[in-house]
Amino acid sequence: MLQEVFQKSAVFVAKKIVQKAMKSQLKITRVNQEIQRKFDKNKKYLLYIHIPFCHTFCPFCSFHKFKYDEDLAHKYFKSLRLELQKVHDEGFAFDSLYIGGGTTLINEPELLQTITFAKQLFEITEVSCESDPNHIDPEKLKIFEGYIDRLSIGVQSFDDTILHKVLRYEKFGSGDVIEKKLKAMAKIFPNTNIDLIFNFPGQTKEMLVRDLQIAKNLGVSQITLYPLMNSNLTSATMYDAFGANTSDKEYAFYTIIQEQMLDFEKNNAWSFSKNKTAFNDEYVGAHEEYIGVGSGAFSFLGGNLFVNAFDLEEYASLVSKRSHAIIAQSSFAQKDQLKYHFLTWLFNGTINIQNFEKTFGTVMKKSLKFELAMLKLTKSIKIEDGVITTTAFGDYLALCMMKEFYSGMDTVRAMFRQNLFVHVKEGKKIQ
């Protein structure tokens, strides 16, 4: 009983710590001149490409996106490839590529051309790409064989009641329809991932277990289970869809997930695979630093968060004139960088203390004294032979902290969302 009190308190405190850190340290400064980025030219980074277009918007999604317009998209992809060329000329090297959105496969020919161009510029050995159920037609996907190594499909739920409420039933079809589509394409790529969301208002244990069983029977190599992230950007649309949420079953549902996924390997707190891999949706957990290209993309480099232009006209204009489209940045103190890296490593489930200390030039028991004490007190971790391993509760705690981190990043997106659609409504296009 006392341990349960400690654990509930730990979740509350951990969330507050992340919220406070994001609020106090994430001070975005607008920059009006080109930034010269400092980086290791002998290091290979992760490259992130953002495709900011969707046909319709889901109420729970907080990512940066615009209503799809074919002419607008053609011009955007042209600017995107120009930015890739300039990032190459700047001297960056990449071995991994992650493509997110938006709807990444919304224009297959343009995306294929962009992936091909990126592979020509850089020694990319693995490409991960997101999709939705409308863009998994086997015949269309075959053009990406040899180009995409991992396809991640945002299913979110197979339950028709939930699909109706989040406006995905008419958009993508029933759970049965989606299941049949997935079975038809599951073997096209070396790795196929299914994204599911848990803790929807009104979701029951039976609905969750059914979602998990369907996903596991599809023959896919990975399943990612995100807790519902209801940020300031999505609270109004989620209220319209579900009404007031009076019951939070997150921890209970996560316990069910842990039990149901015992026959899969845990990649991190919310990703599971038939074979353990770092090649999953959570690229920030596998890469300390990464470079983002495209409208609204983030980069994390040398303790700095860099933000690309969100407005499409501004993005195109900056790319044509500069080596990148950065319009804002936030610099983190060394202590806060250390906490961030500790969170991402903890999220992955294990931390080799010696490797961590060597990578970040620190003595963990001194620099993270409070964090380690809290994790030990709540039995969130075990330390044996110099390796920290998360317990079942520790996985949930790491999930909660990562969830708060992403909610904090939504505040950055919110800063740049004002008036983003005005130029589209007025008929203006990228020049």
Image (cartoon, rainbow, N blue to C red):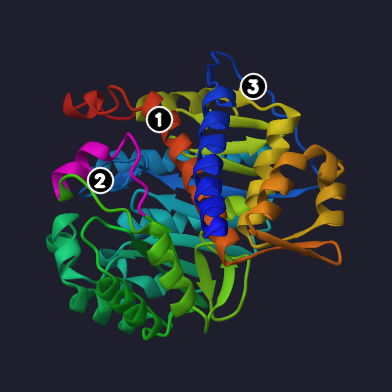
User: Tag 3's secondary structure?
Assistant: loop
Q: Position of residue 87 (x, y in %)?
A: 62, 38
State how far apart marks 2 and 3 are (Cα).
Answer: 32 Å
The quadrant holding residue 225 is bottom left
Q: Nearer the viewer, mark 2 or mark 3?
A: 3
Q: Is residue 192 above or below residue 58?
A: below
| Mark 1 residue type | Phe
Mark closest to the chain's N terminus, 2 or 3: 3
User: Tag 1's secondary structure?
Assistant: loop
Q: Is residue 91 left or right of residue 9?
A: right
Residue tagged by mark 2? 70
Q: Is residue 409 above or below residue 155?
A: above
Mark closest to the chain's N terminus, 3 or 1: 3
Q: Residue at coordinates 31% horizontally, 55% vertically from top-left?
A: 106
| Mark 2 residue type | Glu
The numbered mark at residue 310 is: 1
Closer to the camera in the image, 24 or 222: 24
Instruction: State yes or no: discs 3 and 1 in contact (Cβ < 8 Å).
Output: no
User: Tag 2's secondary structure?
Assistant: helix
Decide if residue 117 is in sight here: no
Q: Position of residue 269 (x, y in %)?
A: 54, 62
Q: Is residue 166 left or right of residue 333?
A: left
Q: Which residues are magenta?
A: 228-241
Decide if residue 352 is in sight here: yes
State how far apart marks 1 and 2 are (Cα).
Answer: 18 Å
Residue tagged by mark 3? 35
Q: Is residue 150 left or right of residue 182?
A: right
